[in-house]
Image (spheres, rainbow, N blue to C red):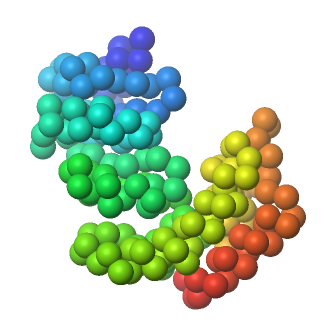
């Protein structure tokens, strides 16, 4: 299954490998520990499931053996909670179109600057989530739309996903503009 695939990938490359627990890749803590023992170049674990019990189990069981990062959609929303679990970094999709805001948020999380974290969540992330949560699949669509607004058109999403509707796109453009120069 998936564990055999991860092991094959690790054994076929000489660089570090980060496993992304997401969708059909649902490695348990014992299985991940076995992989880490057999694969010295398995260096990281990215969580895209949001299963806190599993994340705690993995973090406690493997300790410093792996590097950990959050990989949920709009990972910033979970950043403070994940930092408390021992997962200090995350993969930011919004960095693609609001890099300054994304870095300001990251630095605020790192410094435990709760006032700045709350302000950015209130001013950007909650309205952003309102758009993203309008339709299933918009977690991808909204990032592509944001990149296009910022001047980095990555083309339309692939079926079965759909692009943002024009009114939603305009709301996102206004929200991005409100963040100032990036």
Determine the image quadrant of residue 79: bottom left
The x and y percentages for residue 24 are 50, 23
The x and y percentages for residue 8 are 35, 19
Q: Is residue 14 in view?
A: no
Residue at x 33%, y 49% (from the top left corner) = 69
The quadrant the N terminus occupies is top left
Residue at x 35%, y 14% (from the top left corner) = 4
Determine the image quadrant of residue 107: bottom left
Relative vertical location of residue 28 with respect to residue 146 in this rendering, above or below: above
The x and y percentages for residue 141 are 71, 52
Q: Foreground residue, 181 or 12?
A: 181
View extreme (bottom): residue: 181
> In this image, 150 relative to 159: left or right?
left
> In this image, 158 relative to 7: left or right?
right
Residue at x 46%, y 79% (from the top left corner) = 119
Relative vertical location of residue 123 with respect to residue 80 in this rendering, above or below: below
Residue at x 15%, y 23% (from the top left corner) = 37
Q: State the count of labels.
A: 0
Q: Is residue 145 in view?
A: yes
The quadrant the C terminus occupies is bottom right
Q: Foreground residue, 152 or 114?
A: 114
The x and y percentages for residue 54 are 30, 32
Relative vertical location of residue 34 with respect to residue 111 in this rendering, above or below: above
> In this image, 38 relative to 7: left or right?
left
View extreme (right): residue: 166
View extreme (top): residue: 1
């Amino acid at each position: 299954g998936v564990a055999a695939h991860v092991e094959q990938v690790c054994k076929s490359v000489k660089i570090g490998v980060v496993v992304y627990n997401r969708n059909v890749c649902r490695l348990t803590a014992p299985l991940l520990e076995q992989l880490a023992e057999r694969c010295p170049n398995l260096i990281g674990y990215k969580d895209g499931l949001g299963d806190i019990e599993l994340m705690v189990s993995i973090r406690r069981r493997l300790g410093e053996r792996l590097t950990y990062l959050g990989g949920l959609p709009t990972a910033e929303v979970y950043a403070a909670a994940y930092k408390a679990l021992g997962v200090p970094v995350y993969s930011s999709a919004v960095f693609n179109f609001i890099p300054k805001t994304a870095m300001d948020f990251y630095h605020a999380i790192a410094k435990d600057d709760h006032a700045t974290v709350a302000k950015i969540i209130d001013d950007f992330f909650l309205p952003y989530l309102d758009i993203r949560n309008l339709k299933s699949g918009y977690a991808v669509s909204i990032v592509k739309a944001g990149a296009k607004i910022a001047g980095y058109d990555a083309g339309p999403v692939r079926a079965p996903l759909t692009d943002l509707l024009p009114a939603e796109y305009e709301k996102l453009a206004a929200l991005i503009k409100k963040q100032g120069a990036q």
